[in-house]
Image: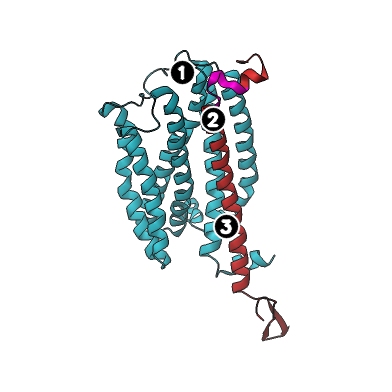
Amino acid sequence: MWLWFSRLGSPKWFYELAGRWLPWTWALTVLLFVAGSALALLFSPPDYQQGETVRIMYLHVPAAFLSMACYLTMAIASVIALVWRMKMAFAVARSCAPIGAAMTALALFTGAVWGKPIWGTWWEWDARLTSELVLLFLYLGYIALHESISEQSQADRAAAVLAIVGVVNLPIIHFSVDWWNTLHQGASISRLQKPAIDASMLWPLFTMLAAFFAFFAASLMSRVRNEILKREAASRWVKALVKA
Amino acid sequence: MSFTSFADFLAMGGYAPYVWTCYGATLLTLAVIVAGLRRQKKKLMETIRLQHPERQAVAPGRIVVKQTAEDS
């Protein structure tokens, strides 16, 4: 366990391992997106209330789920980095931010486009929508803070603190539909109960969730490898790698 | 299969602009992320290469920095 942990902290080891895994992860991503899109667009039924707009769900739900999962990853990496002074964890946290910001923006956008025909409005200042918007600002704030401090380790630590403080927003987003009156519907899938949606819609949704997660894994690994190159630019192995 | 014809599929029960905008936006988002990753890697490789001009040992103990086009 400890050997594994200390190896994980080695940028060179991670760079090479991720390099071997990446082609497979990208291939899996493409496969899952092709299968997921076919299921979502062709083989799932229209909703009895929402008609064909329900097909937006297969993008909106995974994007929103990932926007939060990515933030959690970023916060956990920040805690590990601060507590065990693990440089690699800072690289992971920094790499999560742009991907998470993009996913949050996508969740907000698809939500707005879905809201127009179904709710009759693009946007409403209700709890779920507003807290998800705050999540976007947290990501952007993290990136801006990190970029504004030129000294690497100071930027890492300041941004890590911001990431950790921002975690309070995650339960707010998650429970907002229960705590406040909101336009947004409640959760359809929960660990404790039988899902509130039919299997013919559940499977396309699961496939799309898997596709988004595979994409997250692949893009995060690629981003961390770039971050390693940047941070280890002075090391011998990076110089050798660049010349090869 | 939930649609009977291709035109039916494109029409999305009258919600075509909404559904296709979302699928387009998703594709665009994923593409922007991937393009950003590739551009970042290319830029980093170039920067690192410029920081460390090629060195060549000509004799034991002597290191000569080779002039590259970027140096002059």
- Residue found 60% across the figure and 33% down from its top: A33
- Please, which residue is most extreme toward the right here? B58
Q: Nearer the viewer, mark 1 or mark 2?
A: 1
Q: Does label 1 or label 2 sit earlier along the sequence?
A: 1
Mark 1 = which residue? Answer: A50
Q: Colour of chain B?
A: red
Q: Which residues are magenta?
A: B10-17
Mark 3 = which residue? Answer: B40
Q: Residues within 10 Å of mark 2 (few under 14, many from 20)?
A: many
Mark 2 = which residue? Answer: A208
- Residue found 62% across the figure and 72% down from its top: B50
Q: Position of residue A205 (x, y in %)?
A: 51, 25
Q: Colour of chain A?
A: cyan
The relative height of residue A11 versus residue A217 in the rendered view (above or below) is: below
In the image, what residue type sits under mark 3?
Gln
Q: Main secondary structure of the magenta part?
A: helix
Residue contact at pointers 1 and 2, CB within 8 angstroms:
no
Residue contact at pointers 3 and 2, CB within 8 angstroms:
no
Chain letter for mark 3, please. B
The relative height of residue B33 versus residue B10 in the rendered view (above or below) is: below
Q: Position of residue A227 (x, y in %)?
A: 52, 58
Label 1, label 2: how far apart the Cα atoms are: 20 Å
Q: Nearer the viewer, residue B19 or A171?
A: B19
In the image, what residue type sits under mark 2?
Met
Q: Nearer the viewer, mark 1 or mark 3?
A: 1
Chain letter for mark 2, please. A
Q: Secondary structure at mark 1?
A: loop
For residue A230, say whether it is visible.
Answer: yes
Q: Residues within 10 Å of mark 3 (few under 14, many from 20)?
A: some
